[in-house]
Each structure stands twice: as C-alpha cells, then as structure tokens.
Image (cartoon, rainbow, N blue to C red):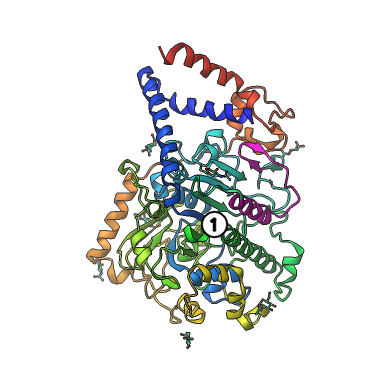
Amino acid sequence: MSCHKRLSTETNNNKNNSNNNRVNNKKAWLILLLSTALAVANGQAEANGKPHIIIIMADDMGFDDVSFRGSNHFLTPNIDALAYSGVILNNLYTPAMCTPSRAALLTGKYPINTGMQHYVIVNDQPWGLPLNETTMAQIFKQNGYYTSLLGKWHLGMSRRNFTPTERGFDHHFGYLGAYVDYYDQTLMQNGKNYSRGHDFRSNLQVSHEHVGEYLTDVLTEAAVQLIDQHNATAKPLFLLLSHLAPHAANDDQPMQAPAEELAQFAYIKDETRRYYAAMVSRLDKSVGRVIDALARRQLLQQSIVLFLSDNGGPTEGMHATKASNYPLRGQKNSPWEGGIRSSAAIWSTEFEKLGSVWRQPFYIGDLLPTLAEAAGISLPPTLKVDGLNLWSALKYGYESVEREILHNIDETDAYFAYTKGKWKVVNGTTVEGAYDGWLGSRHATEIDPRAASYEQVIRNTSVWQHLQEVNRGAERNITALRQQAQLGCSELPGTPCLPLKAPCLFDIDVDPCELNNLYEDHRNASFFLDMWDRIEQFAKQAHPPANKPADPKCDPRYYKNEWTWWEDEQQAGDVGVGTGTASKCLCVNNLPFILFIFLATLTGLWL
Ligand SMILES: *[C@@H]1O[C@H](CO)[C@@H](O)[C@H](O)[C@H]1NC(C)=O
Ligand SMILES: *[C@@H]1O[C@H](CO)[C@@H](O)[C@H](O)[C@H]1NC(C)=O
Ligand SMILES: *[C@@H]1O[C@H](CO)[C@@H](O)[C@H](O)[C@H]1NC(C)=O
Ligand SMILES: *[C@@H]1O[C@H](CO)[C@@H](O)[C@H](O)[C@H]1NC(C)=O
Ligand SMILES: *[C@@H]1O[C@H](CO)[C@@H](O)[C@H](O)[C@H]1NC(C)=O
Ligand SMILES: *[C@@H]1O[C@H](CO)[C@@H](O)[C@H](O)[C@H]1NC(C)=O
Ligand SMILES: *[C@@H]1O[C@H](CO)[C@@H](O)[C@H](O)[C@H]1NC(C)=O
C-alpha cells in the first residue's frame, strides 16, 4: 500500500516537472495544491446532486446480437429489458475498431484529432493515447466523481503513464492490452515468438487471484462489489465496465464459455455461433446483475445506465466470432454501417420519453459532453471536443439535430467515411474489400425456445421489474418497440458501390444497408461538394497516426511472463533474457527516480 502511494506521488511530480522552467514548476505545484483542495471541497458539496454514471461496454458485439432488434436466434432478456424501459439508441455511431473507439469515448474527439485513427494498439507496440489528451475519467474525477474502469483498457501500456490509473481512473481492475483468455488472462500474440503473457491487474499490481474463473463473471462480481461498497453520499460513481465479452480469446481457443451457459444453446448447430451465443448470454446476465446491485443499494433513481458495443462484430477474418451485424453491410474494421453502428440503450429517470426509439444520430464522442452536461460539469472550451452535447435532445427525445460525423480518415488503409444528415460518403475500404459484403444473417429455423413467450421472458427479468418500480409502472408495448428497433432494407438491387474505384454515396435514412450508390446522381450537387470540402478540411488538420512499430523488448518472457510497461522496465535497467524483473510491486525499479525527484524538489524547486 505505502508503495502504491509513493508511486502516485512520483507520477504527480513527473507530470508537473515535464516543464523545465523553475518558476512554472512552482506555479504548477501551487495550482495542483489549489485545484486538489477545490476538487475535494467541490466533491463533498455536490456529490448528492450528481447522477451515478454506469457505462457497460461490450467488445465486438454484432448489431443483431441483441434480441431487442428482433432476432430470436438467442435472447438477451436483460439488455432488452433495459432497452424497452429506457431509450434505444438507434443511430449510435462508433469507430470501427477497439482502440479508436475507446479513444473517442474517453476524449470526445474524432480519432484523427488524437492520432488514434489507424488500426489498434497491438500489445507489442510502444504507443498509447497521447499523454496530453484529457480523458473523460479525469474530468469526472476532477468534478468529484469516484472513477473506476473494470476490464479492458487498450489505450496504451508500454509506459506506466499510459495506463488507466494514470489517466484519470481512481481504480482499475482488468487488463491493459487487446484481449485475454477468458480463464487464465493470458495473451499469446499472433505471428510473434514472444512467450504467452498474463495481463490482469488490480490497479498497478499484477493479480493472479481470479485465474481459472470466467472473466465475464469476474468483472461482473467486481462491479457488484464496487456498487455494494460505494459510499454514494461521499461521491457519485463513474463506472466504465469494459467487458472482454463477446470478443474472441486467443486463436488457439478463441471461443470460451462456461459449460452451463453453453448447454442452453444446444439447439445452435454451428459450434462457433453456439459459443458466441453463450458468451453474449453471460454478458447479458452481467447487465442484469449490475442493475440488481444498483437497485439493492437504491441507486437506480440517481443513475444513468448505458449499454453499448465499442464497434460492430467480426463475422469473418481476424478474431472472427460469427457475430452478426444483419442486415447491415460490413463488419468490424470496415467503413460500413455494420462496423460503426452500435446496438445500444440508455436509461435515466431524467428522460421524458422512456420506452422509445431515439433516431437522432449520436456519436460515441458525444457521450463526454452529453454526460458532463447531465452531471452539471461545464467543459473548458480549451478541451476542443468534437462531440456534441446532446443531453437536452436525449432528455426530451428530440431527433432534429442535423449533424456531421466523421467516421474516419485512415490514410494508411486509404479509406474514409463521413456522414452529414442522411448522406454518407465512403471512399476506399479496408482489407482490400474483404469485409465489404453483407456478412451477417438471421436464422429462420434455429430459434431460442424462450422466444415463444418473449414478452413474458422480458417482463420476468429483475431488470424489467426494478426499472418498472422506479418508473412507477409506466406501460410499455414491447412488441411495438421491438418492431420499431428493426431496420428495413430494400430487397431491390441498387447501383453497386465499388469503393476502391470511385467514391460511394448513400441515403442512410432510406438505405441503412448501403445497397444503392447515389454518387453518380449527386456528384455535382452542391451538398455533395460541400461534404467533400469538409472531408478535405478534416484530412488537412488530421494528426499523424500515433502508431509505432513493434518493440520485441515487450516480450513477456523478460517480465515473469507478464505483459507490462516494458519501456519503463527497460529504462530502469537490469532487464535481461530469462531474468524477469516484473514483480507485484514495481517500486524498487523506480526508487532511484523517486529519490531523484525528491532531491530535486528539495534543492531546486522551492528556492
Ligand atoms: C498534444 O500534442 C500534439 C503533438 O505535440 C499536438 O499536435 C496536439 O495538439 C496536443 N493535444 C492537445 C490536446 O494539446
Ligand atoms: C522461439 O522461441 C523459442 C524459445 O525461446 C526458441 O527456442 C525458438 O528458436 C524461437 N523461434 C524463432 C523462430 O525465433
Ligand atoms: C460516507 O461519506 C460520508 C461523507 O463523506 C461520511 O459522512 C460517511 O461516514 C461515509 N459512510 C461510510 C459508511 O463510510
Ligand atoms: C418467470 O419467472 C418465474 C419465477 O422465476 C418462472 O417460474 C417462470 O417460468 C418464468 N416465466 C417465463 C416465461 O420465463
Ligand atoms: C402493441 O403494438 C402492437 C404492434 O404495433 C399492436 O399490434 C398491439 O395491439 C399493441 N398492444 C397494445 C396492448 O397496445
Ligand atoms: C478516393 O478513393 C480513390 C480510390 O481509392 C482514391 O484514388 C482517391 O484518392 C480517394 N480520394 C480521397 C480524397 O481520398
Ligand atoms: C457531373 O460532372 C461530370 C464531370 O464534370 C460529368 O461527367 C457528369 O455527367 C456530371 N453528372 C451529373 C449527374 O450531372
């Protein structure tokens, strides 16, 4: 514990010493002290008025893999109960991959404006969300929240400064890299000869405590405990429950689910899809248990609960799970709606139109300003977020904010996708077009036996019952809502889009499935030329991608088979093949640095 304290002190020193000017250093210290004092005072004064914010994020879940969209292949009764009780976010857009999506969530910015636009952070690459970016966790923490990340980070780990407790989270319990095994929490990097590395921590300390348990349950249990123990009078809670599910595990055993969960889906013949159903179903139970815990603590009334996926599901290709984004085109890591449209729902007693489908285009980067508004936090304009504050639109159910969303400009993969109002432009594509098709399908014959009494199953969930109680039993027409959340797509073939040959233009309102390319019809129209200009403007201002090539010094074999902040470890010295220095507490390696800062402070800064 004492060791932990020292580390945080060192970090503060580190941040505030980055500027070499002595006077500024002194100022920085004073500002730090003052702002800490203010934040503490603030937190105590206002905690009660602020909503608790609970974000439950699925990893790589398909658009059609929640049953509130109409699929009966396997049911997700808890997520559905949340959706019908709250507001279904019908047009929530995210980047098409994990790292850019999480960067957009936490910064409120388009990935091209933070250098996070290309691909993801592969575990052996020494880069992360740039350290000068402010995260949502920092903002909520500064405004009196207790901030916790449970589960996946994936925004950098090669240096300790990249990791969640250095980026605004009071607490992290989970993994730092791309994914892990559901049981032993290891990642074996594809195509490399590194050793298999364990990646799971409690704050900064390696934790093997839950090896052997199913990760979805471990994270759920941690969320339940956190909610049970949280002192809601002292501080409002900001919880990002960032699940591994239903992401694939390592390639040697990508699909993993507890036997009893799997047994429920014996009617699904395809083995991968059967495992996938069980993985999603366990995730669905997690949503139920978190809402139960909030209800038990009587915190629901003051909570905003959001469920979403970070991006579309991978039906095919790398880490494929047979996820389905039906009826949308494409999948994860593609510019199409199947890659960037998330099945999501949000609930709060603040909403006037609970039990509705909200069609307002909403970007994952809007969540920062929108939730900040809900918490009465005013963001400094210097933050320059790209996201819009849509809190009042969400609260009153307006759908009329015309807006643009820059989905991505990836010069490395040579594609971009951009939406303005109902129009979407796609130029170029990923993976040479391998994911350009309509890859998902909906099973007509394999049906979850519970689907026969679908409404009863939903009403039977504790989620439904708790939320009904808080909503004072407002009636909902589940069947009607389920119909409204379905997307209609034309059966007629339209003009094809060949994105490697020429740009494509779609009217997403009538053609969410991107079947009919209207580029030739409108290429000279002023609205289209304006869109094109706007994209060029974004491209000009884009940050260079922050990606860096692999660094074999990350190899877990040097660190007791742990994935760790290897650049710090290397700098600290004594790292050699076979003599790992990673330990549960990494203080010893950093003692010289701490001493240096301590002495520097004594001798220089205060004179
Ligand atoms: C962070 O630093 C980069 C590179 O120096 C710069 O381009 C960017 O604008 C900075 N971001 C912020 C939020 O200050
Ligand atoms: C991979 O690592 C193992 C164990 O260190 C070593 O024996 C083997 O030669 C390596 N293979 C390659 C291709 O580098
Ligand atoms: C919760 O916090 C409040 C305000 O800081 C404090 O008065 C109270 O004793 C705390 N309750 C518990 C159970 O720690
Ligand atoms: C509803 O829950 C009750 C009690 O748990 C159970 O007996 C019943 O079978 C459930 N009904 C449906 C349709 O799930
Ligand atoms: C619910 O909506 C469905 C479909 O719109 C409709 O057929 C049904 O009559 C509605 N039920 C009630 C109780 O209003
Ligand atoms: C649009 O895509 C085409 C074909 O991939 C490419 O030649 C062109 O440079 C792209 N235009 C822009 C503005 O990126
Ligand atoms: C748009 O302009 C191009 C080139 O100037 C021309 O070839 C094409 O026919 C025009 N298309 C329409 C729909 O007007």
- Asked if residue 216 is among those painted magenta in the image, a careful observer would answer yes
- Can residue 427 be seen in the rendering of this structure? no
Image quadrant of ligand 4 equals bottom right
Q: Secondary structure at mark 1?
A: strand
What is the x, y in percent for residue 486? 48, 76
Residue corresponding to mark 1: 57
Give the image quarter of residue 461.
bottom right
- Can residue 344 be seen in the rendering of this structure? yes
Query: Which range is magenta?
Result: 199-228
**511 over 29 or under it: above or below:** below
**494 over 519 or under it: above or below:** below
Position of the C terminus by quadrant: top left
Could you say which is closer to the camera, residue 556 or residue 21?
21
- Asked if residue 454 is among those painted magenta in the image, a careful observer would answer no
What is the x, y in percent for residue 512? 42, 72
For this orientation, the residue located farthest to the left is: 526
Residue sitting at x 41%, y 24%: 29
Position of the N terminus by quadrant: top right
Residue sitting at x 35%, y 48%: 385
Q: Residues within 10 Å of mark 1 (few under 14, many from 20)?
A: many
**492 over 12 or under it: above or below:** below
What is the x, y in percent for residue 61? 57, 62
